[in-house]
Amino acid sequence: MKNIIALSPIYTEDSNNLKKASINSPYELNRFNAKWSVPEEFRSDVIAVYGEDIYAEIVAEQCNLTLTKPDDSWLSKISEEFTKRKISYGRLKEFVGEENIFIKCSDFKSFKAGVFDKVTNIKGFDSLDLESTVFTSEVVEWELEVRCFVLNNEIKTHSSYWRNNDFDTNPLSEIEHKGLFNFFNGFIQNYAETLPKAIVLDFGIIKGKGWALIEANPAWCSGLYACDAEKALKVIVESCVKN
């Protein structure tokens, strides 16, 4: 039996880096074809998938995989001790009257997440399903945002991706590195049991408030930024369970 990871047919820097990282690994990364269909003869050998969320779910169904992720409402249940901001979860229609809030879809990207003066200002609002679930939070200013690939309650690789309103993947300073890991250790002690063993967690520094949890994302569809692709690959594999 081969250990195949199905890659999206869409070529990205992340998928190319994972492909390179797999050369000396026990895994074989295969894009198969552009029809989002894994040939029957390979389906039993596919142990994981990486790509866009819709692609991953289609392949998972074909190859009898369970894609692990937190509950949809997970973020709203985290204490403000770790989020440093009030977060709500519910159906879009419940927040129509809200003003000056950050809002994001909880599942597929029906609209681009962001800060809106009014919820009805979301692009294409009139065509959105008001029953769809979303997260909202008070608006804060992030000074730094960091992506962490986590396996068995340990950060295996991490990368900054946003600093002072600019895309930035430069290494963290010594103080930032220490602050991240100290905050992570306190967080994971409280919430490890609420998460799958392989997950991507984003943390950051809120201006005037310090380190905070941003969100959790499934490893099987998360961008790498400057994370070590070989280490990230191991987390991705563990985020998919063969049934």
Image (cartoon, rainbow, N blue to C red):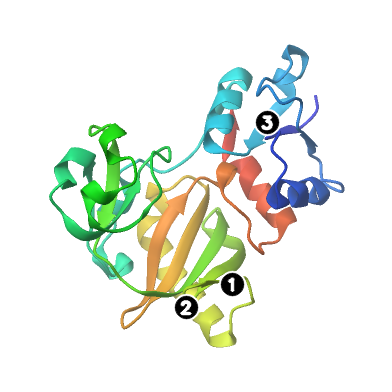
- Residue farthest toward the left in the current orientation of the protein: 97
- Residue 239's x, y, as percent? 57, 41
Mark 1 → mark 2, Cα distance in angstroms: 9 Å
Depth order, front residue of 215/115: 115
Q: Are marks 2 and 3 in contact (CB under 8 Å)?
A: no
Q: In terms of sequence position, does the residue under pointer 2 or pointer 3 come before the other?
A: 3
Residue 149 x %, y %? 58, 57
Disc ID at residue 53: none
Q: Position of residue 89 (x, y in %)?
A: 24, 47
Crowding at dot 3, Cα within 10 Å, few <14 / some 14-19 / many 20+, comes out as many
Residue occupying the point 49% across, 74% down:
180
Q: Residues within 10 Å of mark 2 (few under 14, many from 20)?
A: few
Residue 162 image position (x, y, % from top left): 52, 70
Contact? badges 1 and 2 (CB < 8 Å): yes
User: How many numbered discs, if any?
Assistant: 3
Which marked residue is nearer to the observer: mark 2 or mark 3? Answer: 2
Q: In this picture, is 19 found above or below 32?
A: below
Q: Which mark identifies residue 164?
A: 2
Residue sitting at 29 percent across and 44 percent down?
Answer: 134
Q: Which residue is mark 3?
A: 47
- The residue type indicated by label 2 comes to Asn
Label 1 secondary element: loop
User: 10 Å neighbourhood of mark 1: few (<14), some, or many (≥20)?
Assistant: some
